[in-house]
Image (cartoon, rainbow, N blue to C red):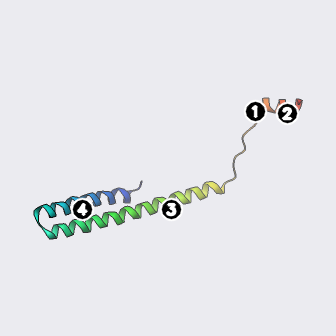
Amino acid sequence: MNKDRVEGKIKDVAGRVQRQAGEWTGNPKEQVRGAAKQVEGKVQNAWGKAKDAAKKKSADKQASSKPPHRAVDSPEEEESEEIG
């Protein structure tokens, strides 16, 4: 989880609170400000999710481009193969 996702979630929650407070007090300006802050938070959170997905895809691509490591055979297995 990156900084954008955290800040976006905080703005989303703060916007919900502000919008709800505007509804309770009958203040349409606060409702609009809260809704705008909520949308801003959702967009920032979505941007953070996209960045995380791109970072994960890049890391997966790098990991899959490396050849797999061969497990080292134990000396006991080598002896049994030679005998049998």
Q: CA distance from mark 3 to mark 1?
A: 40 Å
| SS for dot 4 | helix
- Label 2 or label 1, whichever lies nearer to me, is 2
- Looking at numbered disc 2 in the image, what kind of residue is underneath it? Glu
Please give the label number shown on residue 37.
Answer: none
- Looking at numbered disc 1 in the image, what kind of residue is underneath it? Ser
CB under 8 Å between callouts 3 and 1?
A: no
Please give the label number shown on residue 15.
Answer: 4
- Looking at numbered disc 4 in the image, what kind of residue is underneath it? Gly
Q: Which residue is label 3 attached to?
A: 54
Looking at the image, tell me whether mark 3 or mark 2 is earlier in sequence order: 3
Q: Is residue 21 left or right of residue 72?
A: left
- Dot 3 alpha-carbon crowd within 10 angstroms: few under 14, some 14 to 19, many 20 or more: few
Q: Is residue 41 left or right of residue 74?
A: left
**Residue 48 versus residue 75 in the image, above or below:** below
Please give the label number shown on residue 74.
Answer: 1
- Looking at numbered disc 3 in the image, what kind of residue is underneath it? Ala
Figure quadrant of residue 75: top right
Looking at the image, tell me whether mark 2 or mark 4 is earlier in sequence order: 4
**Picture residue at 76% right of the left edge, 36% below the top:** 73
Figure quadrant of residue 62: bottom right
| SS for dot 1 | loop
Looking at the image, tell me whether mark 1 or mark 4 is earlier in sequence order: 4
